[in-house]
Image (cartoon, grey):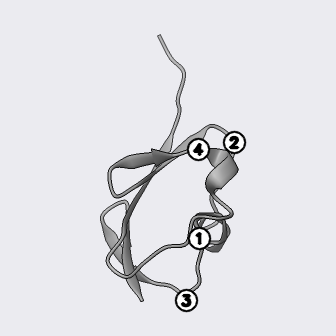
Amino acid sequence: MNIKINGEAKDVAQDCTLDALLGLVGVNRQGIAVELNREIVPKRLHGETTLKDGDSVEIVRMVGGG
């Protein structure tokens, strides 16, 4: 199935979860927020949130500064 990750199209397996997707794209899970179709998904739900064809995922890294 086809989804968008940070605006770029990607093919993933039908049963792909958010957690599996993060591993697939090699994202360090510390200090990130994940948005699925414009809704923030809590980290505790990443393993049970299954993606659907056409979903849009945004992965945002928190950066400190001042």
Identify residue type, mark 4: Pro
Helix, strand or loop at label 1? It is helix
Q: Examine the image and state in which quarter residue 37 appears.
A: bottom left
**At 42% from the left edge and 89% from the top edge, which residue is drawn?**
1
User: Is any part of residue 16 visible from this angle?
Assistant: yes
Identify residue type, mark 3: Ala
Question: Where does label 1 land, which residue?
Answer: 21
User: Is any part of residue 28 visible from this angle?
Assistant: no
Tell me the number on the disc at residue 13: 3
Identify residue type, mark 2: Gln
Helix, strand or loop at label 2? It is loop
Gap between marks 2 and 1 measured at Cα: 15 Å
Gap between marks 4 and 1 measured at Cα: 15 Å
- Of marks 4 and 1, which one's residue comes earlier in the chain? 1
Crowding at mark 4 (Cα within 10 Å: few <14, some 14-19, many 20+): few
- Of marks 2 and 1, which one's residue comes earlier in the chain? 1
